[in-house]
Image: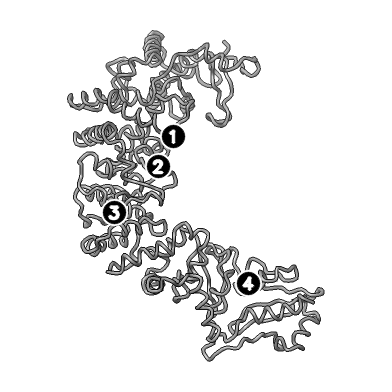
Amino acid sequence: GFIYGFNASKNIVNETSFIPIDGQQRLTTLWLLYWFVSVKEMVEVSERKFLSNFLYETRHSTTEFCKNLIKLSPKFEDINIVKEIINQPWYFETWDYDPSVKAMLVVLGDIEERYQQLQISNIWKLIEGKSCPFYFYKLDMEKVGLTDDLYIKMNSRGKGLTDFEYFKAGFSEILEGQSSRERFENSIDQHWIDAIWNLVLKSNDYNEEDDVALVVDDCFLNLFNYITSVIAFQKDIQTEEGSRYKDTEISGDLIKSIYKETENQNILFDTLDAICEQQNSFLEFWELTFYFDKLKFNSNKARLYFQHLDASLLERCLFYFGSRAFTYPEQLLLHCCLIHLRFKTDNFEKRIRVIRNLVTNSSNELREINLGYSFNEVENYILNGDLAVFKYFNSDQIEEEINKENSICVNFEDIDVLHRLEDSELFRGSISIFPFDQSFRVRALKFLEIFDEDEICHNGLHKGNLLLCFGDYTQDDNQLTNIMGSTQETVRSFLTTPSYNKKDLYLKTRLVLLDCLDFFIANKPVSLSNKIKEVLNDYRTKEKDWIYYFIMYPSFRENCHQGYFKWFNEDYCAWKLSKKQLNGYHWDPFLHEIVKRFNSSKLTLGNYGTYDKLMLVINRKKILISSHPNGFLFENGMSNGANNTLFDELIAERSIKKNGALIIKQDEQGYDLEDRIKKLTKIIENYLSN
């Protein structure tokens, strides 16, 4: 006979798959025949492995039935094949109502009966391989000229059960207690699903062309999977192979293990009931708990920093838990909120802020292996408010929260300022750089004034130079030194624990920052720019250390995106790094400033300072210039040491010594007494201007 169909594209299965549009019943019957004979005659697995290539996707229930059937090895003892299949633990009663499954069972019963009538014990050899008596002529639909849509409509078997409907039927069977089963069945199609409908309809996370009913079903399954995942993490329930709960499709066996316990059933049901109650009587809960925009600060809310800007973590879970885009911090915060909604806990605003601080600053600690402990700890804290429960979050942040509670929340009256400082993008809850003393309030307000989180984005270099006016605030990071970048992220990494170097954070950065804040608190009329000018003016009569050059020449920080420098010889020999690796772009900041000053094709500097020196080219004569602790070194840049009149002229004019050195006047400690950049500029200027 003929069968019609089309070849599947890559995004369906693979390049060699064939999708039949007509002839499905004949192909399915043939597959069932081969399966029955192979298991009846105990054919080697390797010989019948090809039967696994058959996929039946009319309905989800039929797909699952076929997947389980191919794995079955019937015993063929006292009952017929149909009863043996129905008695399998993976067979759901609801499959009795799937017309495709029913039809397959009828066919299998008929095959078994005819097999017995034939009284032949080796049918496999008659139907396998080249001896196969069955032939089909495949007619590609592309060649016939009819659309697959037409054939699909002609051969439609109706809509299949959705994953949600399949879940409902299966989960109900898991519940052994009559009261639990009735509670589930009475709620799932009423107030539970109604609450999800309301959430979906008011959200912006689905398209108008989507089938809303299917979207709601998927959202409910995402919520169920989230709640079940939390229970499994908290109670460390996993498969014998160590696999964690994923979802209803992958982790069917774990669902049975989890919900055989009445306590876990009640957690699920009570959580869903609490969500319904919140939807019915406290719609504004999420907007009153979280905010994103700095301008909408409210001391009773906790600011969130996720990119999605959605205060309703419940909606986030509904739409994104299935795609694994619902992050661990979001999951922990949502769990706290659901615990609060279930138990009506005390001091929730204060406690959820503490949790926000912990999850935001524990990115290294929030791993799957520890997540069960994390869920238990935040739940315990929301219920009881005891910070001593925390063990599996960032230890620095735990210590900070304890210090806040002991030092500020008891003695400090202006909690509003504390919360405003915590909520800054530059801290995100980690403010241990500030001592919790009587000066906390005025220092916090002054910081928020000077180091505004938005201004940092376009004026970060200026703020870094301002801090240098009060001393060396840098932090060593292994062989590199960080001088603070100019983005919110790099500034936050610099100012919060563990920073780049926790010792330097407290012994250097903190002291300089506090000196800066205290100065402007005591000298309100002085502007930031005037302070920088004052410091530079003082340098006119004293030695010029590295700090002078950074303040004097803003280019020293340009292109140094993460704030990393590598000093390799005292104050005046360093590389500024584009990122954090020397195998990326890096430059000598002194030479980089010279290039920027002239912007001439005769003066160039490569992007790899380790190999690239400043090159001056005059009348095809090349000079290479590099930094040295006591000045600069000029070298003949001509190949093979060819005569270089430019180099000779520099020596003759005594601009440089015979060995090519340009010496800078220095004191006994090796600090510059003159500006080396100005001196080098003057020499180069004489040649570029001619």
Q: Residue at x 30, y 38 (%)?
A: 227
Quadrant of the drawing holding the C terminus: bottom right
User: Of the numbered discs in the image, which one, if any, rests on residue 354?
Assistant: 3
Is residue 364 visible to the viewer in this orientation of the structure? no
688 lies above or below 580: below
554 lies above or below 314: below
Type of amino acid under label 3 = Val
Q: Which residue is mark 1?
A: 205
In space, the residues marked 1 and 2 are separated at their CA atoms by 11 Å
For label 1, count other residues whose C-alpha is less than 10 Å away and answer few (under 14), some (14-19) or many (20+).
some
Q: Which residue is mark 2?
A: 310
User: In this view of the protein, which residue sits in the foreground, 670 or 11?
Assistant: 670
Q: Answer with left or right where residue 83 lies relative to residue 99.
A: left
For label 3, count other residues whose C-alpha is less than 10 Å away and answer few (under 14), some (14-19) or many (20+).
many
User: In this view of the protein, which residue sits in the foreground, 102 or 482?
Assistant: 482
Looking at the image, do the residues carrying marks 3 and 2 touch, with CB atoms under 8 Å apart?
Answer: no
Q: Residue at x 60, y 16 (%)?
A: 147
Q: Answer with left or right where residue 537 lies relative to residue 424.
A: right
Q: Earlier in the sequence, mark 1 or mark 3?
A: 1
Quarter residue 141 falls in: top right
Looking at the image, do the residues carrying marks 1 and 2 touch, with CB atoms under 8 Å apart?
Answer: no
Q: Secondary structure at mark 3?
A: helix
Q: Answer with left or right where residue 404 lies relative to residue 526.
A: left
Q: Earlier in the sequence, mark 1 or mark 2?
A: 1
Q: Earlier in the sequence, mark 3 or mark 2?
A: 2
In space, the residues marked 3 and 2 are separated at their CA atoms by 20 Å
Type of amino acid under label 4 = Glu
Q: Which residue is mark 4?
A: 593
In space, the residues marked 2 and 4 are separated at their CA atoms by 45 Å
